[in-house]
Amino acid sequence: MLELQDVTKTFGKQVTAVAGLSLRLEPGVVGLIGHNGAGKTTLMQMIATLAKPTSGSILFDGQDIVAKPETIRRRLGYLPQDFGVYRNVSALEFMQYFAALKGVRDPARIRRLLELVNLHDQAGRQASSFSGGMLRRLGIAQALLNDPDVLVVDEPTAGLDPEERLRFRNLLAELGFDKLVIISTHIVSDVESIAGQLAIMRNGRLVACDTPDAILGRARGQVWAANVDSDEYERLRATTHVLHAARQGGRMALRIAHPSLPCAGAQPSEPSLEEALMAQRYAVKEAA
Ligand SMILES: Nc1ncnc2c1ncn2[C@@H]1O[C@H](COP(=O)(O)OP(=O)(O)OP(=O)(O)O)[C@@H](O)[C@H]1O
């Protein structure tokens, strides 16, 4: 459906935001994971045809979207990271405005979308009074106006409280049944339960692209739990990859990534997805 072939994007001579990235994506939810500055936004902007690759090609259903951006634009919904609304209008007026811009004439569609994102009761309310989560949901409703086949959502849960994050996550999961939904985040838990595929970026490169199960499978047998004194902790910090450390009485409870038994008494332990990514040095850390 969407195929990136050796895509590179540079800014000036110094910055390579995306470096020779190749990726093939089919309908479903794809989590694009990487730390700040990994190149996620730049990649999404290229998919959304808001930026052109310096080299490489992007094909949508076999058609080159760099040469012919309109082939994807008609079938794309995009929610940028810094999505803002005109705050002096109501949610309904905001939707009506974008419906007119996108040539969507069916008023029932606006109502259905506001229902889908659970804002129908608030349709007459000024967007200026909305919470971060409500604004994001309005953003998704706007992005869905043209019934897109590809939905690109950049850092959707930034600034949302846990309940809003959960609601938003569920909404994206539902949309992923028949669309390609690409979600960028540096928070693994935002996508681990809903993404069928995870694309991991680091320094502009794709370092892995796989199902969560496959990523977990590769880390099995490499994650250990250990309870050690402070001397042993110092030794392990120097010789292994300590994923997590918590003080427990006078000792340290550790989660460690290591290919073999890291210390006497360590127990093999089932990795979380975040630990699996860290164990494989994809170095994606959970944000608070
Ligand atoms: N317009 C630009 N001009 C120069 N450098 C840029 C530009 N846009 C992005 N960059 C640089 O490209 C790199 C990748 O940035 P990008 O925003 O794509 O990363 P990201 O993974 O989305 O990070 P974040 O999660 O912080 O948004 C960074 O080093 C960034 O500073």
Image (cartoon, grey):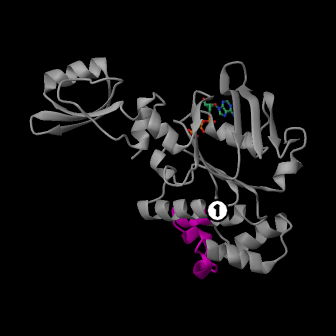
- Which image quadrant for residue 3? top right
Residue 266 vertical position relative to residue 76 in the rendered view, above or below: above
The residue that disc 1 covers is 175
- The reply to whether residue 277 is in sight is no
Residue at 45% over, 27% down: 281
Per the image, label 1 sits on a secondary structure element best described as helix
| Image coordinates for residue 233, horizontal then vertical, percent | 20, 25
Which quadrant of the render holds ligand 1? Answer: top right
**Left-right relation of 65 to 277:** right
Return the residue nearer the eye: 184 or 215: 215
**Left-right relation of 219 to 44:** left
Return the residue nearer the eye: 90 or 113: 113
**Left-right relation of 44 to 235:** right
- The reply to whether residue 214 is in sight is yes
| Image coordinates for residue 80, horizontal then vertical, percent | 66, 51
- Which image quadrant for residue 120? bottom right
| Image coordinates for residue 203, horizontal then vertical, percent | 58, 27
Whether the magenta-drawn stretch holds residue 170 is answered as no
Whether the magenta-drawn stretch holds residue 136 is answered as yes
Residue 276 vertical position relative to residue 1 in the rendered view, above or below: above
Start-end of magenta stretch: 117-137
